[in-house]
Image: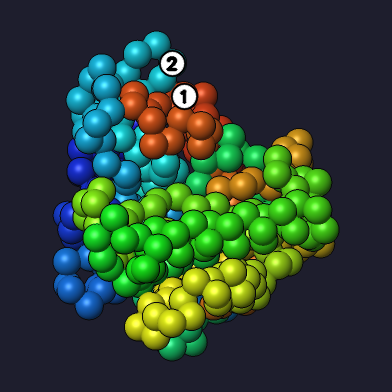
């Protein structure tokens, strides 16, 4: 089946992260099983989500992993001009949810798998597809833990997020957290006698801004990024029940987007410590009040060195494509962290089109990806190390 036909089938699965992905995971498994791949679904605790690992070729530890995620972001509230779950072609583009992020790459992988099934591979080809990447790289952790527990090894991993078919060797990591602020309620006419949780939340935001200022002034720098240092950001504040009541509770959801060289936990602890200092005088006399911090999700950044075998592998196939770094996160850092696997991010399309209404990918990008994967496949058929 050609890439475009496979992409149409993949887009037709409304595999939004909030829903079960078993239908699309089963489709991919069945497609690869028919081609002779050894396939295994790795389910989450609910049994409603599954990752897929599929392998073809000799059982050696010098193979290639092609990695991607099956989930997509929601379409609610977006003004689409065509059905987001029906692939629509207009001129040199095809439109549909996930066309760029990242079912275009998945379709190309499933298409090249058909060619792989007709070849005698000297090194194995592994296809790893995850769930729930869009909500913080949640699903791939179970897949990588499973692979690690089973002694899985490979030489190189390529994560197919949209990069315009240029190799990405670095991206920032992320830590998402919540600060829950507990005040002491009372009538607003006597507000100075009580403790307003919203005021505590303001101090949390102040601490977040303090850390951001320090990072901008003296933090680690990497000029390859649009923002060349780690950042902190308060994204959601909720609090209060009525205007005439001193707020009992408020929450601040915030994130740290960090260079791979920076430790997100250290930055998180700095925000906590600065908050404690800021609120010390406010909570005095209110023993049940304070601020509690919880980390809700975190994934590492990626810092693939210039001498990495993964980058050398890509450059051997695409010598004209310069490497670069991106600010958005991917699952790539987890492949390095959990499997010590040299990893590069490379895939068709532009992330600027991802998550948008009328998301699209150009046919030219799909063609480049198809040609790239076919050349990658050829490298697995020769007696030479990756």
* Residue 331 image position (x, y, % from top left): 50, 61
Residue found at x 55% / y 52%:
233
- Identify the element where label 2 is drawn: loop
Q: Residue furthest top?
A: 91
Query: Horizontal placement of 145 versus 243: left or right?
Result: right
**Mark number displayed over residue 302:** none
Compared across the picture, whether 23 is left or right of 271 comes to left
In percent of width and height, residue 42 lies at 29, 73
Residue drawn at 74 percent across, 57 percent down? 215
Q: In which quarter of the view is residue 318 placed? A: top right
Q: How is the image coloured?
A: rainbow
Q: Which residue is mark 1?
A: 362
Q: Secondary structure at mark 1?
A: strand
Q: Which residue is mark 2?
A: 92
- The total of numbered circles placed on residues is 2
Which image quarter: residue 63?
A: bottom right
Q: Residues within 10 Å of mark 1 (few under 14, many from 20)?
A: many
Q: Is residue 309 left or right of residue 356?
A: right
Q: Residue at x 53, y 57 (%)?
A: 205
């Amino acid at each position: 089946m050609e890439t475009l036909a496979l992409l149409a089938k993949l887009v037709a699965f409304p595999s939004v992260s909030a829903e079960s992905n078993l239908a699309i995971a089963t489709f991919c498994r069945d497609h690869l099983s028919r081609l002779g791949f050894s396939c295994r679904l790795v389910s989450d605790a609910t049994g409603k989500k599954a990752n897929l690992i599929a392998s073809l070729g000799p059982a050696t530890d010098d193979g290639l992993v092609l990695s991607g995620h099956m989930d997509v972001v929601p379409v609610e509230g977006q003004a689409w001009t065509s059905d987001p779950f029906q692939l629509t072609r207009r001129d040199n583009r095809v439109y549909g949810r996930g066309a760029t992020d990242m079912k275009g790459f998945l379709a190309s992988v499933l298409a090249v798998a058909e060619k792989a099934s007709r070849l005698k591979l000297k090194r194995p080809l592994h296809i790893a597809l995850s769930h729930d990447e869009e909500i913080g790289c949640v699903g791939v952790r179970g897949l990588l833990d499973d692979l690690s527990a089973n002694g899985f090894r490979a030489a190189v991993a390529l994560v197919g997020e949209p990069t315009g078919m240029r190799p990405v060797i670095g991206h920032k990591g992320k830590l998402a957290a919540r600060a829950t602020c507990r005040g002491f309620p009372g009538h607003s006419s006597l507000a100075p006698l009580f403790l307003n949780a919203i005021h505590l939340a303001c101090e949390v935001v102040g601490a977040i801004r303090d850390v951001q200022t320090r990072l901008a002034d003296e933090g680690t720098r990497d000029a390859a990024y649009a923002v060349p240092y780690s950042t902190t950001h308060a994204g959601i504040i909720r609090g209060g029940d009525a205007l005439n009541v001193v707020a009992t509770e408020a929450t601040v959801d915030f994130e740290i987007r960090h260079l791979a060289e920076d430790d997100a936990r250290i930055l998180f602890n700095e925000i906590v410590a600065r908050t404690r200092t800021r609120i010390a005088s406010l909570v005095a006399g209110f023993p049940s009040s304070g601020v509690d911090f919880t980390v809700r999700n975190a994934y590492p950044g990626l810092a693939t060195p210039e001498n990495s075998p993964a980058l050398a592998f890509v450059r051997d196939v695409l010598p004209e494509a310069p490497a670069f770094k991106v600010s958005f996160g991917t699952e790539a850092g987890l492949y390095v962290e959990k499997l010590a696997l040299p990893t590069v991010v490379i895939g068709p399309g532009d992330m600027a089109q991802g998550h948008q209404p009328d998301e699209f990918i150009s046919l030219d990008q799909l063609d480049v990806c198809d040609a790239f994967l076919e050349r990658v496949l050829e490298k697995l058929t020769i007696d030479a190390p990756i």
